[in-house]
Amino acid sequence: MSERRLQMQLGIGACLASAFLIFAAIPNWVAAPSNIKNILLSPMFWPYVLAGCTGVVGLGLIAAGYRTAEGPSEDFVDAHDEGMGAWVRMIGMALIMVGTMALMPRLGMVWTSMLCFALTAFLVKTRHPVAAVICAVVLPLVLYAFFAHVAGVAIPQGNFVRLP
């Protein structure tokens, strides 16, 4: 399979998934009270934002596919000849997911998210380990601060360390 064909298929799939979410899944399966004053706090707002972003990324992949030359590229062929490494990463990701569910009640959502973000970054062998560790710490804390203190949403805390 050529890189162009892969990008086109992924782009079309992302656009179809976005359309399904926007027109079927979110309106039918996300419940939201009608008396919410702030649109940012509505349970339907962020799913629509993510579905829209998925559609935009899909359109970008389709556009990139049209610009890509036909035929397999050397980088594309080499990237898929990893063999056992792909299976090891997939098993590692499954272990991180199981670990997330096991640690969430004990450590809480913020600390577990930090740990899982960092583990996932190192599992996929990021080129920017310092930035990955900084993001692993800062992003969950910023999200906690917003949801707990601005939006007034209770974030699950762990048994050992409680955030203010």
Image (cartoon, grey):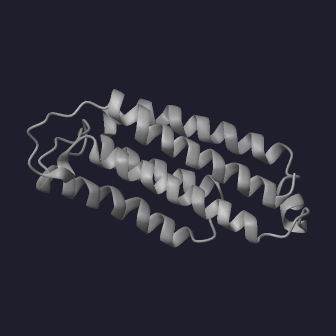
Q: How many marks?
A: 0
Give how far across and how far down residue 22 sits, in percent. Answer: 41, 42
Q: Is residue 70 found left or right of 111 in the rendered image?
A: right
Residue 14, position as x, y percentages in the image:
58, 48
Image-quadrant location for residue 106:
top left
Q: Residue at left 66%, top 66%? A: 63
Q: Please state which of residues 161 and 133 is positioned toward the viewer in this rendering.
A: 133
Say which quarter of the image contains residue 161.
Answer: top left
Q: What percent of the width, then of the height, locates residue 81? A: 89, 52
Placement of 25 over or under 145, stated as above or below: above
Q: Residue at x 56, y 68 (%)?
A: 129
Q: Would residue 118 appear left or right of 80 to someone viewing this image?
A: left
Identify the residue at image location x=69%, y=67%: 64
Residue 66 % position (x, y): 74, 66
Res. 163 visible in picture:
no
Q: Is residue 22 visible?
A: yes
Who's the residue at 32% across and 48% down the image? 46
Residue farthest toward the front in the current orientation of the protein: 23
Closer-to-camera residue (94/20):
20
